[in-house]
Amino acid sequence: MKSIALITGASSGIGKAIAQQIADQYRLIICGRRISRLKALSKVLSHKTDILIGSFDVRDQLAVSHFIDSLPTKWQKISVLINNAGNAHGLSFIHEGDTQDWDAMIDINVKGLLYVSRAVIPKMIKAQAGHIINLGSIAGTDVYPRGNVYNASKFAVDALTKGMRMDLNTHGIKVSEIKPGLVETEFSEVRFKGDLEKAKQTYVGYDPLQAQDIAECIAFMLSRPKHVNIGDMVVLPLAQASSTLVNKQQK
């Protein structure tokens, strides 16, 4: 029987692409807030694998714990956890930031990752095996103007990944992080609060990464033999040299 992979933020973007990419190799627990999108994805992938839907917000620790603790017996042994759920809210100077935006980024990007990991990791420790992949960002190593709290949340993901790898070292559990650069998804629509024109401009003048590019990299991470752990992977579009340096004359 196929191993089980749990993916958060699977209703769109990178999470959805990951589910599509690895469906042939894993039974999938696809999680997110938008149940209609998860049902649609489940229907598309149902001919490839068994799928269980988890409809919860990673910010809700009780909901996360209840879902993981209530998994049917055949879904208990999670081999892969992909902490993909995350968002950027706003692009403001630190002295002009919206504290609700700050809370959203810290709650989703940091605390949400922790809540899901805390619920799943004991199952991996019991099995003395597993692979955790955290979705970081180059924003977690390269600060940019007006990125402040989003940068901080992704720096936290980087630190947590390293801490997890140390704490789980004796339990046969792999811990990896992938740090994408500019990926064309709903990310900018959320950051700019539905301003589609502003979001579109983020990706004009060059070829950004696509969600599929990141999904393929994650599939490669998962395909390595037992003794190989790709601890850190940075993935950029050709036009991008750093968080702030993008050649928009490339197309």
Image (cartoon, grey):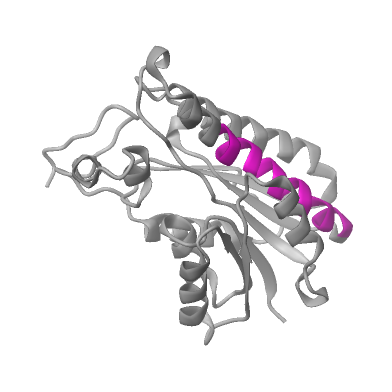
What residue is rendered at 71% in x and 54% in y? 63
Residue 21 in view: no
Residue 125: say if magenta.
Answer: yes
Is 109 placed left or right of 251 in the picture?
A: right
Q: Quadrant of residue 204?
A: top left
Q: Is residue 241 above or below residue 183?
A: above
Highlighted magenta segment, given as a residue range: 106-126
Image location of residue 100, percent across then percent down: 49, 30
- Figure quadrant of residue 235: top left
Q: Which secondary structure class fits the magenta region best?
A: helix
Instruction: Residue at 69% x, 49% y: name it.
Output: 116
Image position, residue 247 (x, y; %) = 18, 35
Report the side of 182 relative to 14 (left or right).
Answer: left
Q: Is residue 68 above or below residue 108?
A: below
| Most distant residue in the top direction | 95
* Quadrant placement of the N terminus: bottom right
